[in-house]
Image (spheres, helix red, strand yellow):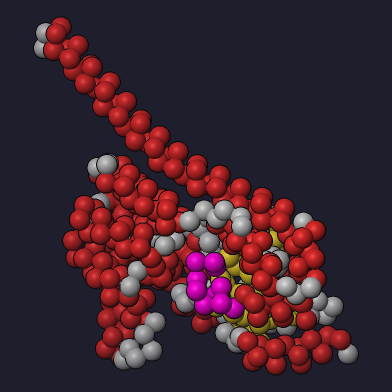
Amino acid sequence: MNIRHLVRFAALAALTASALLAQTGELAELASEWKTANASFRAATLALRNSEAFRRAQAAGDRRTLRRLVDAIPRPEASDYGRRALALADRRQGDDALAVLTFVANHLYDKAVFAGMADRIERDHLGAAGLDAILENGIVLGNFLEPARSAALLTRIANENEHPLPRAWALYWQSMLILRDPAAGPAERERAAALQARVTELAPEGVLADRVAAPAFEREHLQVGMVAPEIVGRDTEGRPLRLSEFRGRVVVLEFWGFWCGPCVAAVPAEQALVEKLAARPFVLLGVDSDRDLDYYHFEAETKHVTWRSFWCGEKGVIGAIPSKWNVTTWPRTYVLDHEGVIRFKDVRGKALEEVLEPLLAAIER
């Protein structure tokens, strides 16, 4: 190779490196904008809640004024950022494009955006080795895609992706779709067991292996009448937190997240319960599965969630706590008595209030 060719090659390499850096910078800039917009919204919401106008309207029960005040704060829309992210993915190729779609899957929760993400996965990334970074968040994927579309996407990945982890995740979520179906009979459940056996072959260690083993842990440690296992972690503010801190009180332990429609629908009733039992030996303790803490704080400020939650970390629904506790449907609720014994599972609404009363009364005698 002569000097002229060397110079030309070096120039092309420099241009390629520059283009890659620019692409990386575009995603980082978009992610930073999203984070800053959410932080600004949080700050504005907090300032509003502390304002005299808000407090007056709240004291008067003036919902119309409260709504007007809240709606006046510019709210970052996942749909807007999602369209920008999908356009950015279209300008990139290979792993660079997949990195953008991974950002979408983990942060920009919008049905139209998720549909666009699925389109691009099917078109360009079915065989990608890094697809597991999206499939890890399979519950959220299923929540924002139509069920048939989600199932079809998982089937194509399981059939067409040759890499162990993406294929294992697709097979795992296929098995969970079967196990969550109340109409699934013995033959379907046998198929789900076979899918999970294949998952263990493809991913013998790590989170997926733990999730496959979790049903046995639930049978052995999480039944009514058993003392709930300890949970050690940090809350959504980063403070150390242990389940055993609340011995001596009745605990409603709720596995939830703002990404989960039924979880969000339950928030007003939970707020009322917390207020009603404020003077009694009771605590509502969450295990939050939102992967993005900015998103969590954004929603918590807006929806007035005041109780503490463990944070599952950036792995969200496949974090260590829900994986160990075999949480595969959300929300999941445990009612613990003052000695930490599991007394009820998955009771909500009026039924929850009814089972709490005798547990509280037993402490207050």
- Magenta span of residues: 257-266
Left or right: residue 357 versus residue 168 is right
Membership of 193 in magenta stretch? no
**Residue 333 in the image: x percent, y percent?**
59, 79
How many discs appear?
Answer: 0
Given residues 330 and 199, the one toward you in this image is 330
Residue that protrudes farthest toward the left in the picture: 1
Left or right: residue 166 versus residue 238 is left
**Residue 69 in the image: x percent, y percent?**
66, 61
Given residues 278 and 172, the one toward you in this image is 278
Magenta segment, principal secondary structure? helix
Given residues 126 and 147, the one toward you in this image is 147
**Above or below, comparing residue 357 to residue 92 in the picture:** below
Q: Quadrant of the N terminus?
A: top left
Q: Quadrant of the C terminus?
A: bottom right
**Residue 324 in the image: x percent, y percent?**
52, 69
Given residues 245 and 182, the one toward you in this image is 182
Residue at 54% in and 67% down: 258
Q: Is residue 168 visible?
A: no
Residue at 31% in and 47% down: 87
Q: Is residue 29 visible?
A: yes
Membership of 260 in magenta stretch? yes
Residue 144, located in which quarter of the rendered image? bottom left
Residue at 26% in and 23% down: 15
**Residue 236 in the image: x percent, y percent?**
64, 58
**Above or below, comparing residue 41 to residue 350 in the picture:** above
Residue 61, located in which quarter of the rendered image? bottom right
Residue at 46% in and 74% down: 328
Residue that protrudes farthest toward the right in the picture: 365
Residue 264, located in which quarter of the rendered image? bottom right
**Above or below, comparing residue 234 to residue 323 in the picture:** above
Residue that protrudes farthest toward the top in the picture: 3
